[in-house]
Image: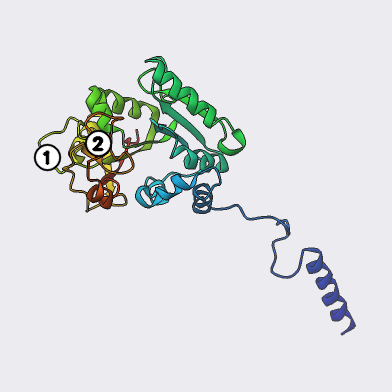
Amino acid sequence: MRFMMAGAGAAALVLAACGGSGTNADAAPDETPTPDASALLDGAIAGENRSEEERARDAWRHPGETIRFFGVEPSMTVVEVWPGGGWYTKILAPYLKSGGGAYYAAHVDPAANERSAARVESFRTDFADADIYGDVRVTALGAGALAPDGSADAVLTFRNVHNWLIAGKAQKYFDAFYAALKPGGVLGVVEHRADESADDNDGSSGYVKESTVKALAGAAGFEFVEASEINANPADTKDHPFGVWTLPPVRRSAASNGLEDPEFDRAKYDAIGESDRMTLKFVKPAE
């Protein structure tokens, strides 16, 4: 009996030295669990770097749902094409920084004109804080590679395809997206959605048919994966006097951008809210 008690005492000492019964001896007792991707994304969306005005648009742009639909993980290399003033950059760049990923902003070509140069320089200044955004790598769409060929896990673009159709460069740019992606990489497209019965499809109204985007992606070599109604707005009739720009947030009231008609009745257009948008996911086939 004395021998058994001594053995039991020794076992208790061993367990105590290991941190107690049922614990992993190799685990640090104060180790903090690594946040999962969803928590990191929620944190980026809630970031203090975003203004109240920017947050107010979440109800129309659904950034969390959209980024999750495209399958973007914080460790990925992601290219955002034509980020504009950086509404999505303020979410994507901190999110990727938090997981060791890389963010490329494939901006307008600063060599195109003074206005483009000023926009790119302003963007660089706005996102120069590496503590918040990490290393934001600015490239130019149409002037060299968006990112090193075959390096990106995802290429994303938000409400830009109509501009490329107007410029006659849409297919060239979709080809560039394909080149930047790894095999198996994702192309995510959000765009103002035209009815398939619409007569015009040159981008001049700001709306584009889903079939047109799918054709551009298919011609570049992409395979269509799926569509989401995350950013749909059934209230959008798409027959506005100044195209999609009649709606918020632009709220155009005259044919010429920058001019306003004080007599224009905005009520019904403001009631619609932001545009009906397609959200499409494509993949570069694995080799």
Identified by mark 1, the residue type is Ala
Check the image and report above or below for 270 versus 119: below
Q: Decide which of tag 1 and tag 2 comes sooner along the chain.
A: 1
Please state the horizontal and vertical placement of residue 286, each as a whole percent of the image.
35, 36
Check the image and report above or below for 122 versus 98: above
Tell me the residue at 22%/41% (across/down).
264
- Using the numbered discs, state the Cα–Cα distance from disc 1 to disc 2 in whole angstroms: 27 Å
| SS at mark 1 in the image | loop
The residue singled out by tag 2 in the image is 261
Please state the horizontal and vertical placement of residue 179, each as a whole percent of the image.
36, 26
Relative placement, left or right, of 246 versus 5 is left
Please state the horizontal and vertical placement of residue 199, each as a whole percent of the image.
9, 36
- Could you say which is closer to the camera, residue 11 or residue 61? 61
User: Is residue 232 something one can see in this rendering?
Assistant: no
The residue singled out by tag 1 in the image is 198
Identified by mark 2, the residue type is Asp
Q: From the image, which quarter does the C terminus lie in?
A: top left
Tell me the residue at 13%/33% (across/down).
200
User: Is residue 258 something one can see in this rendering?
Assistant: yes
On the image, which quarter does residue 239 sit in?
top left
Tags 1 and 2 in contact by the CB under 8 Å rule? no
